Structure formats: structure tokens, C-alpha cells
Amino acid sequence: MTQTRGALLRSYVSGNWHTPPGEGRPLHDAVTGDEVARISSEGIDFGAALTYGRTVGGPALRELTFHQRAALLKALGGHLREHRDELYAVSAQTGAILGDSKFDVDGGIGVLLAYASLAKRELPNDTVYVDGAVTPLGRAGTFLGQHVCSPLHGVAVQVNAFNFPVWGPLEKLAPAFLAGVPSLIKPASPTAFLTARLVELIVGSGLLPEGSLQFVAGGLGDTFDHLTGQDLVSFTGSAATAQTLRAHPAIVRNAVRFSAEADSLNFSALGPDATPGTEEFDLFVKGLTTEMTVKAGQKCTAIRRAFVPEQHVDAVVEAASARLAKVTVGDPATAGMGALASLEQREEVRRSVKALTDAGRIVFGDPDSVEVTGADADRGAFVSPLLLVGDPERAEPHEVEAFGPVSTILPYTSTAQLIDYAARGQGSLAGSVVTGDTAFAREVVLGVAPWHGRILVLNAKDAKESTGHGSPMPQLVHGGPGRAGGGEEMGGIRGVLHHMQRTAIQGDPDTLSAITGRWVTGSERHETDVHPFRKHLEELRPGDTLVAGPRVVTQEDVEHFAEFTGDTFYAHMDAEAAAANPLFGERVAHGYLIVSFAAGLFVDPAPGPVLANFGVDDLRFLTPVKFGDELTVTLTCKQLTPRESAGYGEVRWDADVTRQDGESVARYDVLTLVAKKESAQ
Ligand code: NDP
């Protein structure tokens, strides 16, 4: 048989495709053993690549607002979606069945889209992120504090694991890109040919600003020597490599942000209430066997330790074995489980299983033999699902991560013991508790939370919608303490902020307003002849103000409002009861009446650019309003958020309703949608 020679993978650095000199190292199809590609990063000037990212990619990204970056991520997701079939085909060469490929490819695209949509909802259409509320630092209100986050001016060096060649890089790229930080992607060599195709598609799309994404196929050379305090490293892989990289002199010297996601002995626990025959029992067994076989168990979040009440161990072994017996292993096109990523990885799994059998026994599967369908068992990296029953008092089940279709059932006899065992993993990415008993769930979740990044409570109520034990969600934190690396990825906007520097700014209100682009209490207001509701989005400025009133609140108003709405609460309607109320001492106006009167004072009723009022934020009633009090409202434009590719934007207004003595009686933000002038032309 003639052995075909794979093409040399190209890197994309400093604005060019780089083809290495020399022959490179061969990479093999996990199923057929054929050479699919060759890899080498020889000849790359890594220092220059980092400089290129910092000087070309960074500035280009920082020119864009969060929403503009989000729009590019969304477009990129759409582009990759059109090429999914091609990526699935390459993915099959990593040993993945179609379901695994979808997990990786569609999951990665899903992260791009989820981040794009999160950014539009939770980030401003601006280049500066304001973190938290303004903090008064002086009595007179002339000295304030405010935190802002700005993108680091370095490069996010992203070192990925072999098991998710598409999802891994995209999950790291999305938050870095949104933050305004360029990425340098380094995939794990065994499956780098799939990431290389992904990057070709991304670069070929022309969607991302030049320099915002670079790609190294092969080793990282002296990259780490060039890292500065403005760069970041996000690593996924083994704890041993994490330890080496974290201790690199440049990382230590320059306090480079280093985030690691490494080994993890994740657990799933069956609750004592979930006896055989219950829906929860079936959910537990299904979750366990699914986690064993999806991606052939090569998932950082897969269940390695299955805690089962002692009396149900035999029932779980029987039910899980019955399910595993139905899983065919072989050709990814037809089998239920594909191959491991490489023959080396299979050897690694066998070594780990050997260590686990020192503290347990195999109850399903044989590490050295598996029936393979539709493929050559001698050439592909196939292994059987392997279920063990172990001794939870031994160290091995809590410490040895067999990175394949391998799980160990561990009996427990009490909740306290379960919590103790779960913690012996010394830090994990994910845990799950399968129970319908909320008190048990609370005790276990709060007991094990310090050792876990994410915990799923699964039962009949949420099973249908549940995304499962092993799926990290872009909205939620992915990462775990201790052995799991101590890092945090994704987690919604938290993942974006990891790439930014939070800075406390102290100053006077006008200066803070100028820096953040938002009006803050105490900064200059400007009243204009034109009612602010008659101004289009482009014409409004933070600080534009309308003062309206006064309006007297009468007893008739309050009684009319009470009857009209049905809100006849005693504080408004019953003089005697109101007098006994220690906060009021007499009848007072409804808070909602005050807000309604305020609206009546500040609106401009004629059709105009204000399209809708979509809510209020932070509404507080500060001082009771008594009959005869006079209300004045001061409405100030606080923040403008134009929406990309829409004919309008959001305007946040500060509403301050005051009494005749100047005291604030109600304070809140009014949220409106205001048309752009361009859309009216
Ligand atoms: P490694 O830690 O060896 O590799 C992970 C990544 O680090 C790869 O991209 C690798 O590149 C890179 N790398 C390795 N050494 C260096 C270095 N000195 N400088 C810069 N980059 C480096 O893990 P593996 O992929 O080989 O997997 C080994 C084991 O790790 C698995 O069997 C499993 O137990 C665990 N693992 C855990 C994961 C998790 O998320 N919990 C995910 C994947 C693996 P290259 O491939 O080119 O060497």
C-alpha cells in the first residue's frame, strides 16, 4: 500500500500565510492511520508576530465599538455555518462521528453567535466599558469615583487542546475579539489540520480586521520570551504543560495574565431519592453513558467519577452496561462512537486505565480489545467504552484522568461522604447532581461548589431543556479551581472583561462625564429651546435636560388613582391605619402615581423621533409625597446607544422627581428608543 503524504500546514502570521521550510512532522487520520498533513512552525518570527498583533490588530479592533465587533462575530458565525459540511468532513479524520463534529463545529459557531448577541444586549455601542455605578467620594458631590475597563494593548495567545479543534479556538477568540484584543491561535498538533481549515475559512472571509487573528501550526518557538504585561495566555491541555507554561520567566516577571483549563476529574452524583425505576435514575445512567461516548470521552467536562448510593451500584452497573453494549465503535460515518484522536492518545488512556484498575475493577469493556465496525481496528485509535467500579477511599479514582471513554462508579453512604469524595478531585470543571430532592441538591451544591466551576442539577423538571452535564455554555463560567487550572473562560461578559484592564477613575462630575461619554449626577446639564423628545438620536447629547412642573398632588388625585387602578392600599386610603405606619404617619401618594405624573410632565405628546418607552431601571421612592406637595421632574439625557443596522437607538434618561423643598421623592432611569435622523430621510 502506498502511503500518501499530507500537505504542510500553513500558519497565518504578520499578515501572510507562512509555509515552513523542511518537511515537518506527519499528522495522522485517527481512523485510517493515513498521513493527512504535516506540521511545523519553522521559520516563523514569533516576536514579529506578537508585534504585528499589537501594532496592527489591536488598533484596528480598538477603533470599533463593542457592537461593531459583535456584528463582525455574527457575520463570521454565518460564514462558517455555510461551510459546516466541509468542516465535518475534515473533523471525521480526527476520529469524530457526525454528532461529535456537530458538538465541536456547531458548538463553536454557537459561541460566536451567543457572544455577538450578549454584546449587543449587555455592552454599550462604545469603545469604553463603564463598570458599576458612580461612587461619591466627597460630601458635596464634586469628587466621584468610577471604574472603566479598557482593552489590553497586547495579544491573547491561545493554546488549545486536541479534543476541540474548532470549538476551542472560537471559544477563546470570541471574548478576546469583543474586548478589542487580537488573538494568536495555537492548536494542539494532532488535530491542527482541522483548525488550519477553520482559520483558512476565517481569513478567506475577509471579515475580521487584519491582525486581529493569527495562527501558528506547530510549536510556539520563543513566543513566551516576548510576552509583556499587556499580553494574555489562555491555555487548555494537561496540568503538566499548564504548570510549565505558568512558570515561564516572562509570565512570572511581567505578571502576564495566565488562564488555564487543565485536567478535571468531574463527578456526577445519583441522589438517594433517585431509586431504580424513577425518571432521575434513568437520566443519571443516560448522562453517564452519553458523557463516556460523546467525542469518545475526550471531553474536559466528561464524567470521570460517578457517585452512586451504595445500595444502587449493581443497578447502575447493569443499566449502564446495557446502554454501552448498544454503542458500536468504528467508522465515524456509521458507528455510535469514533476513534480517539491518535494512537498515542490510546496508549495514554490504556496507561491511565491500568492505574485505575489498581483501585477498582472493570465491569464493562476491555482496554485491549474492541469490536470495530467499518474500519481497520489495527490502524485506527479505537478503544471500547470502559466502566469501572472503584474504591472511593483510594486516591486513584480522584486523581487519574483517563482521557477517553472511561468512567468509574464510586459508592457512597451519606451526603457528607459524597461531598468529601467530590472535593477529593481537588478542583473540577463540572459536576452534576441528579435528584428531585431540593434539600439534598442544596446541601450537595453548596458543599461542593468551592471545588467546582459549574454544577448541573438534573431532574424530571429540567431534563427536557437541559443542555447536559458536559456542555460548557457561553453565558456561564467554564473553568475550575485547583487541578482544573484555576482559570475562568466565557461566563458571558465576564469572559470579555478578562481581556480588559479595570481602572478606577477619580475626578469631578464633568470630567467623568467627558471620559465615559455618559452624563453623571453633578455634571453639567443644558436646557435647550427644543424639547429633548423632538430630537433625533444624532441631535441628542448627554446632559440635554428638560425641567417640567410643578404639579400639585391632591387627595382627589390619590383617590381617583386608587379607584381607577384598584390599588387601595391602606397607606393611601386609610387615614387611621396610615397614621399608625411609622414611616408615613399620614396618607401618602402612590409611588406609581408619582411616576405617572412625572411622565405626564415630561412627555412631548406629538408624534416625533421617540418611538417607545421600553422600561425603567433602578426605580426608588425616596421620600413620601403628601397631599398638597408639588412635584417637579428633571429629565436628563444620560447615555446614547445607537443600534448597528437599525433606524434607532436606545436613550437612557435620568429622571429626578423633586418636592417643593428640592428633596428627591423618586429617582430612576427611563429607557426609550429614539429614531435616527438618517432613518427619517
Ligand atoms: P498538552 O498539555 O501536551 O498540550 C496542550 C496544548 O499545549 C497543545 O496545543 C500543545 O501543543 C501545547 N503545548 C505543549 N507543550 C507546550 C510548550 N512547551 N509550549 C507551548 N505550548 C505547548 O496536552 P495534550 O493535548 O497532549 O493532552 C494530554 C492530556 O491532557 C490528555 O490526555 C488529557 O488528560 C489532558 N487534557 C485535558 C483537557 C482539559 O480540558 N481538561 C483537554 C485536553 C487534554 P502541541 O500539541 O503542538 O504539543
Image (cartoon, grey):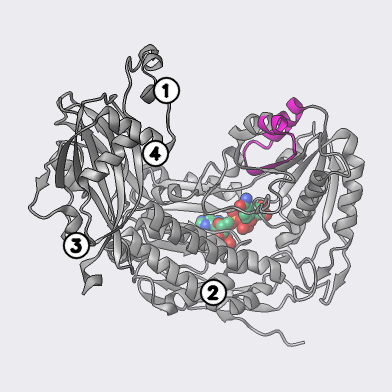
Q: Which of marks 3 and 4 is nearer the N terminus?
A: 3
Find disc 2 in the rendering and name its residue.
81
Residue 641: in magenta span: no
- Where does the image place residue 63, in percent across and percent down from the top left? 26, 63
Name which of mark 4 and mark 1 comes first in the sequence. 4
Dot 4 surroundings within 10 Å: few (below 14), some, or many (20 or more)?
A: few
Q: Element under label 2?
A: helix
Residue at (48, 78) in percent of width and height = 21
Task: Check the image and report above or below for 34 versus 644.
Answer: below
Element under disc 3: helix
Alpha carbon separation for disc pair 2 and 1: 59 Å
Q: Distance between the residues labelled 2 and 3?
A: 35 Å
Mark 2 C-beta closer than 8 Å to ligand 1: no
Q: Is residue 441 magenta?
A: yes
Residue behind mark 3: 538
- Residue drawn where x is 69% and y is 65% of the image: 341
Q: Are marks 3 and 4 in contact (CB under 8 Å)?
A: no
Q: Distance between the residues labelled 4 and 1?
A: 15 Å
Q: Quadrant of ligand 1?
A: bottom right
Q: Name the residue under label 1.
A: 570
Q: Going by the image, does 259 lie left or right of 59?
A: right
Residue 206 visible:
yes
Q: In the picture, which quadrant includes the C terminus?
A: bottom left
Residue sitting at x 72%, y 48%: 303
Three-letter residue code for mark 3: Glu
Crowding at mark 1 (Cα within 10 Å: few <14, some 14-19, many 20+): some
Front-most of 569 and 269?
569
Amino acid type indicated by mark 1: Tyr
Q: Which amino acid does label 2 sit on?
A: Arg
Please provide the residue range marked out in magenta. Answer: 415-442
**Nearer to us: label 3 or label 4:** 4
Residue shown at 68%/37% (left/top)?
425
